[in-house]
Image (cartoon, rainbow, N blue to C red):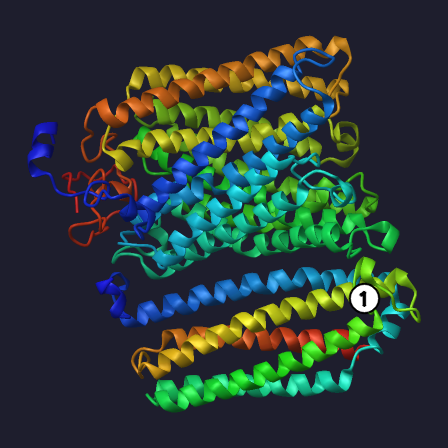
Amino acid sequence: MSTETTPWREYFGSRENQSQAAQLGMWIFLGSEVLLFANLFVGYAVYRYYYPEVFVEASHHLAAGWAAVQTLLLVTSSLCVALAVHYIRSGRAFWMGVALLAAMVLGLGFLVIKGWEYWKHWTEGALPGEYYRLAELPERGGSLFFTLYFLLTGLHAVHMLVGLSVLGWLVWGALVGRYTAEYHVPVEVGGLYWHLVDVFWLFIYPLLYLVE
Amino acid sequence: MNPSMAGSLAEPDYLNHETTVRSWLLTRDHKRIGVMFLVLVIFALLLGGTFAMLLRIELLTPGPTIMGPMTYNRVFTLHGVTMVWLFMIPAIPSAFGNFVLPLMLGAKEVAFPRLNLASVYIYAAGAALTLFGMVWSGADTGWTFYTPYSTTSPTAVTPILLGVFIIGFSTIITGLNFITTTHTLRAPGMHWSRIPLFVWAIYGTSVIQVVATPVLAMVLVLVALERVAGVGIFDPTRGGDPVLFQHMFWFYSHPAVYIMVLPAMGVISEVVCAFSRKNIFGYRMIAASTFGIAFVGFFSWGHHMFVSGQSTFGSGIFGVLSMLVAIFTAIKIFNWVATMYGGAIDLKVPLLYVLGFIFLLTFGGMTGVAVATTSLDVHWHDTYFIVAHFHYIMVGSVLMAFLAALHYWWPKMFGRLFPERWAFVAACTIIFGFIVTFLPQFLLGNMGMPRRYYQYPSEMQWLNVLSTAGASLLAFGFGLIGIYLLWSLRYGKVSPASPWGSRGYEWFSASPPGPHNFREPPRFEREVHDYTVSEAPHVY
């Protein structure tokens, strides 16, 4: 356990190298995450091609206005995370914690809206597969749209929950004074993850809510 | 160098510096993690091999022999699932990659040791869930889980899908770790043109693992959701498309063949140099062709779907792209043969497996070009010809390279030598047994025997009997290897630091290596496997 207290691993040779390794590892992981979502985007493209009218019609059942609010919340939270990285680079751990807390609050706001939206779909019967009960839209195509909608936004929400715990862990680290101007690799890497979650939403939002 | 001296010097090595169970279970030492993976994948190999033997016994006679048709369906599924997901994909990268890659780079550790330990447990958890599914009621879908059958099969497909999904995470973590390690932890003097070819192979494999595995993970989750919630993605009655499953599945599973074969090729590149006493012929070409295979491998998935209703034009393109793999593979084969040409060949057991590998890969590869031809594939599709082809390529190469690696690095890992003569007998048995098992299957397929069938016409019996005889030889060979390797752990001769006189960089460390790999930072002042310069043996 004694080696655990020092954040620097001797076998990396230098601190720069350790920081580079962490960032490279995270970028590779993010690359693999992109491929994970790519599957669902491909599925969306295929079924939109099969059922173009139903997909456009189904997208009108989504709350595009609220999704715009969600987008604003998420983009602002990303700004806060970027600020947090900026603050810790200059050693201001307190402000880093504040910025991350703000990001978390905004992220939670996003999820609350999402939860409300899900609840609305539930009451309408706009649900995937065998739970589909939306009368206005044909089941062929309609249920597939909502399947893809729930998969894309659900997977995104799971990533947000992971991201929120990462941010929470970073705030806790800031409270116990773990991060300094010299050592802030986890903040940078955690920030990268949060930005990825943000970027995914910037693809999901137009695809599901806006495209006519 | 002699055993008594080794005893009196008695520096702690990675095996004996700590011996508690806890020190193994919570270790972050890449060597111990490699050994843990080795034990797990050998267990998987035994399990998959047992299923294979049951299948071969069942097929001894045209009708029912030892099991009913449903049991047969389950057994061939479990054989495939175990061998592909639990053995062949993790075998070489996770076991030997973990053990020797940092040693070859002169690193003390992998970049993320804790993630590395996590990868063992994630693999074990996935394997446990898969085994649970097998014990519960098995699955009868084949290892490919094709929809729409897999979405409606009453067998335990869901836990097996989720088990494989979890193993995928282990694969991604391992790949990520190796790429980062190769980039950031090379010792001074280890520039990119000196990286051992095994590392290049593992690096190329890791790229495929990281890029392709998420696609598989997602498609498995979709099938599981289809079973649980009827989401309709692959269900034609709900407007979904079962062929979409095949596209997504093969987008991973075709490159997965190279996840299995590329590390095997890396092992061969190392062993061939060591026992030819020559540096590799065409280092750059072998390294580059690794990436050629990795790249082209992503654009050839459609050759699994020639009879799925895909356009003729599409099939033609996929056929040509698939054939490109043969060019890159041929580059490697010619370079290995050129390395041996004029070398001071020392026909030890690992090199024997290399010869087996080259034969099986060439034969399997050429039949691969044949089945990439659309017109021929329509005749052979889903017959034993395909079974024979992919066993020659995947199993032939992974198994030969796995055994070559196991024997070549055995003294490195455990500091003991194995009995050479017994190993020689076992190697001959295995290579011969392999050919006798799968060569008749090419003929069976050409005669029209479909794969996965429980019964067959009686004129096909003699070839099936021949195949089962070969499988029995294989089983005998494995039994022999198991016995003498376990024996050597305790009674084998203590190995010198570099028993083969190899110039591979991993032999710069002691055998077995100390807990931190090297006593002093190693200096790589020559090309890997350079036998042209004289060198005093020095263990860093």
At 77% from the left and 63% from the top, the residue drawn is A147
Secondary structure category for the residue under label 1: helix
**Is A36 on the left-hand or right-hand side of A141?**
left
**Is B298 on the left-hand or right-hand side of B404?**
right
Residue pointed to by mark 1: A145
Q: Quadrant of residue A201?
A: bottom right
- The quadrant of the image that shows the N terminus of chain B is top left
The image shows residue B230, relative to residue A87, as above or below, that is above
**Is B396 on the left-hand or right-hand side of A111?**
left
Residue B151 visible to an observer of this rendering = yes
Q: In terms of depth relative to the viewer, which is nearer, B422 or B361?
A: B422
- Return the x and y of residue B114 as percentages of the image width and height: 36, 58
- Return the x and y of residue B193 as percentages of the image width and height: 36, 52
Q: In terms of depth relative to the viewer, which is nearer, B496 or B505?
A: B496
| Number of numbered tags placed on the structure image | 1
At 68% from the left and 46% from the top, the residue drawn is B301
The image shows residue A103, relative to residue B446, as above or below, that is below
The image shows residue A82, relative to residue B463, as above or below, that is below
Pointer 1: residues within 10 angstroms few (<14), some, or many (20+)? Answer: many
Q: In terms of depth relative to the viewer, which is nearer, B276 or B426?
A: B426
**Is B31 on the left-hand or right-hand side of B365?**
left
Q: Amino acid at mark 1?
A: Phe
Callout 1: residue from which chain?
A: A
The image shows residue B130, relative to residue B487, as above or below, that is below
Q: Quadrant of residue B303?
A: top right
- Return the x and y of residue B385 as percentages of the image width and height: 69, 25
Residue B272 visible to an observer of this rendering = no
- Return the x and y of residue B252 as percentages of the image width and height: 62, 49
